[in-house]
Amino acid sequence: MTEKACSTCHLITTGNICPRCKTPTLSDDFSGLVIIFDQEDSAIARAMNIKEKGRYALKVR
Ligand SMILES: [Zn+2]
């Protein structure tokens, strides 16, 4: 199954809509996989404005 990244929140999903924003603005052209385990204690999560743990793409085109 192809993974896609949401162009709005950068969450990576295998579905056709983003489970977080419920938007279909997904792109399979992304790079830089980031896995957030503890969004409270992650500089990357703060920089990317991530509020939930999960797998995110650094760049979505
Ligand atoms: Zn999203």
Image (spheres, helix red, strand yellow):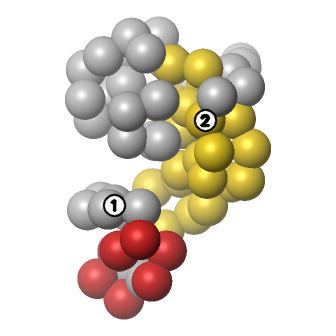
Mark 2 is on which residue type?
Answer: Val
Q: Secondary structure at mark 1?
A: loop
Name above or below for residue 29 compared with residue 37.
above
- 4 horizontally vs 42: left or right: right
Mark 1 is on which residue type?
Answer: Ile
Q: Secondary structure at mark 2?
A: strand
Write the residue at 74% across / 44% down: 31
What residue is pinned by disc 1? 50
What residue is pinned by disc 2? 60
Check contact, mark 2 vs mark 1: CB within 8 A.
no
- Neighbor class of circle 1 (other Cα within 10 Å; few <14, some 14-19, many 20+) is some
- Mark toward the start of the polypeptide (2 vs 1): 1
Write the residue at 25% across / 29% down: 21
Residue 33 image position (x, y, % from top left): 68, 54
Question: How far, Cα to Cα, is label 2 from label 1?
Answer: 15 Å
Residue 44 image position (x, y, % from top left): 49, 74
Q: Nearer the viewer, residue 29 or 40?
A: 29
Is the C terminus in the top left, top right, bottom left or bottom right quadrant?
top right
- 15 horizontally vs 17: left or right: right
